[in-house]
Amino acid sequence: SLKNRNKISTLAINDKWLQNGKRDVYRVIIDKSDGCDEDLRATLAWYDPPGPVGCTKCLVNDLDLWIKDGLTMVHPNGRNFPDTTNNVERIRTQPEVNRDGQEMRIFVNAKNLAFNGQKYSLVVTGCFTRQDLATKPVDTARAPAVEERPAVTTTRPPLMFEMIDTKLGCPNERLFELELNTSTDGEALA
């Protein structure tokens, strides 16, 4: 959130590497206690390698995004199934799904990659507190066991953003820290 401006939480993951056949899971809890009333939104994007000349389905590396709350699964781009044609996928959950206290799981799945892995970026906004940020890849052949699920974290650590300085005429990567909420642990994200 922007301090003293709004109550929206933001989760930003940039250039996260995901191996073929693996899945990252991000868990958040809907929190409307501050009067926040925004839908949960997630956007996944990645640089896809060029497809073959003359292709009709040109997506080379297929990543999938979905959000699940218990039994309900929400797919991106207004579809009722995974998007296998776009390298940008967006989900906006419906108000009835955003119940206060509801655990929401955001999945990024690496399926059918032409190479060993793919970097992606993910931005999630809405009224939530985070349970975990960095999750280890999950084998898509099985669901995570209870002991693999991280404990609930109630603090919101600062986010690290990777920025490119275009004023110099060439990429100059730098890390910036943005304090979204007060953090008691002061740890930066990896």
Image (cartoon, rainbow, N blue to C red):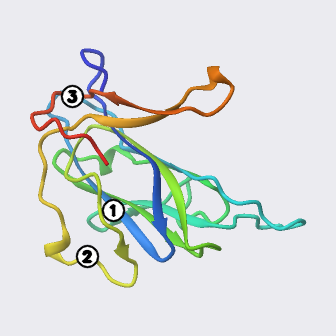
- Give the quadrant of the N terminus: top left
- Answer yes or no: is residue 91 visible: no
Relative to residue 18, is residue 100 drawn left or right? Answer: left
Cα distance in 3D space between marks 2 and 3: 30 Å
Relative to residue 38, is residue 15 drawn left or right? Answer: right
Sequence-wise, the earlier of marks 2 and 3 is: 2
Q: Tag 2, which secondary structure?
A: loop
Q: Quadrant of residue 4?
A: top left
Q: Which mark is residue 138?
A: none
Kindly identify the residue that appears in the image at 48 percent across and 77 percent down: 21
Q: Residues within 10 Å of mark 2 (few under 14, many from 20)?
A: few
Cα distance in 3D space between marks 2 and 1: 10 Å
Relative to residue 170, is residue 139 drawn left or right? Answer: left
Q: Furthest-top residue in view?
A: 4
Q: Tag 3, which secondary structure?
A: loop
Relative to residue 185, is residue 166 drawn left or right? Answer: right
Q: Residue 101 in the image: x percent, y percent? A: 16, 48
Q: Quadrant of residue 51?
A: bottom right
Q: Residues within 10 Å of mark 1 (few under 14, many from 20)?
A: many
Q: Are the residues flagged by discs 3 and 1 in contact, CB closer than 8 Å?
A: no
- Which residue is under mark 2? 144
Q: Relative to 94, say whether 111 is above or below.
A: below
- Which residue is under mark 3? 181
| Count of marks placed on residues | 3
Q: Furthest-right residue in view?
A: 54
Query: Along the line of sight, which residue is nearer the eye, 173 or 126?
Result: 173
Amino acid type at image mark 1: Val
Amino acid type at image mark 3: Asn
- Which residue is under mark 1? 25
Q: Quadrant of residue 138?
A: bottom left
